[in-house]
Image (cartoon, rainbow, N blue to C red):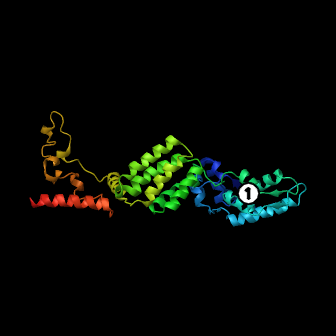
Amino acid sequence: LAPGGILLYLDEIQYFNKKQQQSLLEFMENGSLTLIASTTENPYFYVYGALLSRSTVFEFKQVPAAEVEKAVLRAVSILSARENVTADIEPGTAGYIASVCGGDVRKALNAVELLSDSVREGGVISLDDAMEVAQRSNMRYDRDGDGHYDILSALQKSVRGSDPDAALHYLARLLEAGDMISAARRMLVMAGEDIGLAYPQAISIVKACVDTAFQLGMPEARIPLAEAVVLMATAPKSNSAINGIDAALADIRHGNYGDIPAHLKDCHYSGAAKLGRGLTYQYPHAYPGHWVAQQYLPDALVGRAYYEYGENKNEQAARAYWERIKAQREKK
């Protein structure tokens, strides 16, 4: 802090728009202002970039349940000193309150205060009362914030890593937060991206499970969704399809493409033959094995390979089949 400067604390800075945040830059740069700001959102999404480049970012982690329990017991002790307030708490109750507050000490203390007000003088805060007050876990979850995307990311990575237990855990988090639609959409992505051609039927099964879940609604929807998650987590994996399309897209975006070969162009109109379109096209079904060697990629991309067969049984079987067909054609 510069001598004579101002120390400014801004809570929930994400509510300041870009122009309002920009107005602080001049004063931060000349040293007349030292800014301390806080936000419950990811600052890299909500804070102006120039402001971030002049700042140091600190992340506050959730408080471990063991530490929250200490705060709960301390709060009970403080409240017991007041008149007409309970002076005791049933064993295990403090631990329960700490476990369901989602790492938020303030929520835990609010629960203690509410429970204390609800019992008579000399009474005991019971576990049953605590479970009634905190019927649902207070885990942090915001459909537009980090919590949402972190859980979805963890769900997909757990399925990709073939861990059905972790996958079910993160699915349960989404369902408990009431966000079935996000879970369903991500599961459909996983079926194509991570299971892929190793088990191509997976996408049809997952789609059926998702459709069933939406027809049923919660709580029964959890059953087909869990079935789909476990199926994918325990299925063989292949990312050959997504790698192939991403490689092709990269070429297109970098201008690496050329004119479509004339024999592949549409020739179902008068005058197409005069333009040389479709004249030399060979119909694969007219050849043994339904395959014939001919050029399909543009001239500029001849020899370019986007798809690589995965090591799984399905793709290796397909590879062996086509290699056998091509070998037979080459002999002739």
Label 1 SS: helix
Residue assigned mark 1 = 108
Residue sitting at x 22%, y 51%? 298
Q: Position of residue 319 (x, y in %)?
A: 25, 60
Q: Position of residue 277 (x, y in %)?
A: 16, 42
Which residue is outermost to the left? Answer: 332
Question: Does residue 162 appear in the picture of this structure?
Answer: yes
Q: Position of residue 225 (x, y in %)?
A: 49, 50
Residue sitting at x 12%, y 60%? 330
The answer to which quarter of the image holds residue 306 is: bottom left
- Residue 264 in the figure: left or right of residue 169: left
Q: Where 317 sits versus 288, above or below?
A: below
Q: Quarter of the image for the C terminus: give it.
A: bottom left
Q: Where 279 sits versus 324, above or below?
A: above
Task: Please name the amino acid that badge 1 sits on.
Answer: Ala
Residue sitting at x 74%, y 57%? 127
Q: Position of residue 234 (x, y in %)?
A: 43, 60
Question: For the residue carrying disc 1, how many other residues have a C-alpha within 10 Å: few (<14), some (14-19), or many (20+)?
Answer: many
Which residue is outermost to the right? Answer: 83
